[in-house]
Image (cartoon, helix red, strand yellow):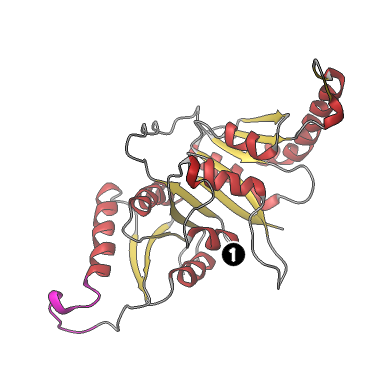
C-alpha cells in the first residue's frame, strides 16, 4: 500500500476545510490523499441502478464532488475516494493505522462550548496510533486566517521529562517540509511561595526560567543537529503549560502537541495541554501519540 494521508469527510464545513488542508499537506509530503466517508447504512454496491434509487447516491456524490474539487486544485496529486460501511469512529481508526496522518474537521468553539468538540473527533484523537490533525472551519463573522507564511511557522509543545522522540520527529519534519521556522514552547507555573504582596520573587522566577531554558537546550540539541535547515527558537514561559501553548499558537500555521500512548486496558484520554489545544487553538492542531 502506498503511503497515504487520510481525511474524514462528512459534508460539514469543518470536513471541507480539513480536506483542503489535507490536500496541501499531502502534496507537500508527496503522499496519496485518501478521502474517507463512513456510514453504517451503506448497502452493497448495486449494478446498473439509476441514481434516483441508488441508496448510496448521496454518499458517493459527497466523495466524488470533493475528489473533483481537490484534484482540480492539485492536478499532480493522487486523490482516491473511499466509502466504508462502518461506524465512523471505527473506520477512521482503521484508516489512521494505515496512513501517515489522519485529518479531521474540528468545530469552531465559542467560550460557552469550550469543552465540546463532537462525538467523533475526540475519541479518534485519543485512540489513534498515528498523528491526527484537527482543522477548524472559519465561523461566520470570524476574520479569515492569513495565508501561511514563514513568520507563522510550526509550534511544538514540549515536556522536559520523559521521551518525546515521535513528537519532535513530526514537528521538525513538518517544519522542514514547509520550509518554516519551528518554535518550541514549554510552560511552567510559578509556585505559590514565589509570590509576595508586591509581586513575584525575581530570584525564584529567574531560577525557574534558567532551569526551563537549560532543559529546552538539552532536549532540542540533537534535533537541531538532525535538521540543520530548520530555524528553531525556544520559548520558556512562566505560566501554566496549557495557557502557554495556546497563547504561543496565535498566528501559527500548525500547533503540534503530544499524547501519551496508553497501556492495554487503560482508558484513552488526552492530557490537559492537548485538551486545551484541541478546544481553544485557532490554527490546525496535530496530536501526536508517543511513549
Could you tell me residue 217's position as x and y percent?
76, 33
The residue nearer to you, when weighing 41 against 235, is 41
- Say whether residue 52 is magenta: yes
Residue 224 at least partly seen: yes
- Residue 264, compared with residue 241, is above or below; it is below
Magenta region: which residues? 46-57
Could you tell me residue 117's position as x and y percent?
49, 53
- Residue 258, compared with residue 37, is above or below; it is above
Residue that mark 1 sits on: 127
Q: Which residue is at 60% across, 30% downward?
A: 231
Q: Main secondary structure of the magenta part?
A: loop
- Residue 82, compared with residue 273, is above or below; it is below
Q: Quadrant of the C terminus?
A: bottom right
Q: Which residue is at 52% across, 32% downward?
A: 250
Could you tell me residue 126's position as x and y percent?
59, 60
Mark 1: few, some, or many residues within 10 Å (few <14, many ≥20)?
Answer: many
Q: Which residue is at 60% across, 53% downward?
A: 288
Residue 212 left/right relative to 16: right
Which quadrant of the view contains residue 68? bottom left
Number of callouts in the render?
Answer: 1
Residue 235 left/right relative to 51: right
Residue 227 at least partly seen: no
Amino acid at each position: 500500500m502506498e503511503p497515504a494521508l487520510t481525511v474524514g469527510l462528512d459534508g460539514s464545513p469543518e470536513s471541507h476545510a480539513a480536506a483542503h488542508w489535507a490536500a496541501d499537506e499531502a502534496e507537500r509530503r508527496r503522499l496519496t490523499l485518501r478521502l474517507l466517508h463512513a456510514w453504517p447504512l451503506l448497502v452493497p454496491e448495486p449494478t446498473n441502478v439509476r441514481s434516483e434509487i441508488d441508496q448510496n447516491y448521496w454518499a458517493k456524490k459527497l466523495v466524488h464532488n470533493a475528489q473533483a474539487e481537490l484534484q482540480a486544485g492539485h492536478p499532480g496529486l493522487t486523490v482516491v475516494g473511499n466509502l466504508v460501511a462502518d461506524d465512523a469512529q471505527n473506520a477512521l481508526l482503521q484508516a489512521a493505522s494505515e496512513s501517515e496522518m489522519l485529518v479531521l474537521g474540528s468545530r469552531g468553539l465559542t467560550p460557552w462550548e469550550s469543552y465540546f468538540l463532537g462525538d467523533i473527533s475526540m475519541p479518534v484523537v485519543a485512540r489513534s496510533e498515528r498523528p491526527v490533525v484537527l482543522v477548524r472551519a472559519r465561523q461566520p463573522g470570524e476574520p479569515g486566517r492569513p495565508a501561511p507564511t514563514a513568520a507563522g511557522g510550526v509550534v511544538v509543545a514540549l515536556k522536559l521529562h520523559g521521551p518525546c522522540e515521535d513528537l519532535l520527529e513530526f514537528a521538525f519534519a513538518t517544519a522542514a517540509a514547509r520550509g518554516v521556522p519551528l518554535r518550541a514552547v514549554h510552560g511552567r507555573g510559578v509556585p505559590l511561595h514565589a509570590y509576595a504582596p508586591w509581586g513575584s520573587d525575581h530570584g525564584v522566577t529567574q531560577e525557574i526560567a534558567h532551569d526551563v531554558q537549560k532543559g529546552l537546550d538539552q532536549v532540542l540539541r540533537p534535533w537541531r543537529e538532525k535538521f540543520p535547515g530548520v530555524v528553531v527558537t525556544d520559548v520558556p514561559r512562566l505560566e501554566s503549560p496549557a495557557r502557554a501553548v495556546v497563547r504561543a499558537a496565535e498566528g501559527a500555521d500548525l500547533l503540534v502537541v503530544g499524547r501519551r500512548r496508553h497501556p492495554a486496558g487503560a482508558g484513552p484520554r488526552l492530557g490537559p495541554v492537548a485538551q486545551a489545544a484541541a478546544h481553544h487553538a485557532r490554527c490546525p492542531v496535530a496530536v501526536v501519540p508517543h511513549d
